[in-house]
Image (tube, grey):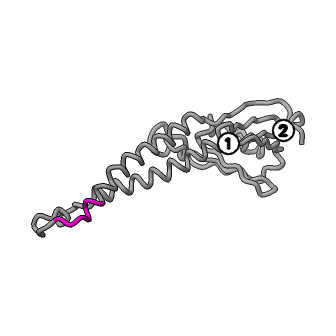
Amino acid sequence: MEIEELGERIETHHTDSPRRLRVAVSCLVVAAVSLGVGIPLTIAHFQPWGPAGQDPRSWVGSGMLPGALTTLGVLALGAGILTLLKYLRTKDEYFEVHRQGMIHHVSGATSVIRWSDVASVRPKGAVSDRGGARHFGADFSCLVVLTDGRRIRFNTFIEDAPQLAEAIVTAVDPSARS
C-alpha cells in the first residue's frame, strides 16, 4: 500500500528521545556510584577482621548496606543499558495517523498499516504525572497486533501515547467512540 492511499494525515506522534536518553544516563550514573561504593564495601565486609568481638560482620545488619548498594547498582546498570539500547534503536521513531491507516517509522524502516490490517489494540494503564513508572515510560503502554502477526508496542515515551492509542482504537472499532 502506498502512503497516498492512507488519505489525509490527522496527527503525528514522535518519540521523546531526549527524555529516554536522560533516563538511560541517570540509570548509568546511579549504577556507577552504587557499584563504585557497594563493591568495595562488599569486599571489605568479607575481609578477616581479627578477634570476633571486634568483627563488624557480627553486628546486626552489617552486610545490608553493601548488599543493597551492589543490588541497586546491578539493577540500575541493567535498566540503563536496556534504555540506552532502546534509545539508539528508536531515536527517530514516529507514528502518523491518517484517515485510512497509519505509518510507523523506526530505525530507517517505514511500515504503512491499513486499519483493516490491525487485529487488536490493547491499551493498558493510565498516564501518571509522577513516580517511577512515569520515569521509565511504564505508566501507560499499548500493544497493536497486526493480522500478519507483527506487534507494535509503544508507551509514554511516545508523545501523547494515550491519544494515539485512542485514535487507533476508534479507527479500528468505530463503536468504541467515546
In front: 92, or 123?
Answer: 92
- Magenta residues, as a range? 43-49
Residue bearing mark 1 = 165
Q: Is residue 4 above or below residue 107?
A: above
Q: Earlier in the sequence, mark 2 or mark 1?
A: 2
The amino acid beneath tag 1 is Ala
In front: 13, or 26?
Answer: 26
Residue at 75% across, 35% down: 96
Place residue 55 in its image quadrant: bottom left
Tag count: 2
Q: Residue 38 placed where, x, y %? A: 33, 54
Image quarter where the N terminus lies is top right
Residue 178 seen by the camera: no
Binning the other alpha carbons within 10 Å of mark 1 as few (below 14), some (14 to 19) or many (20 upward) gives many
Asked which secondary structure carries label 1, the reply is helix
Q: Residue 46 placed where, x, y %? A: 26, 65
In front: 162, or 43?
Answer: 43
Place residue 17 in its image quadrant: top right
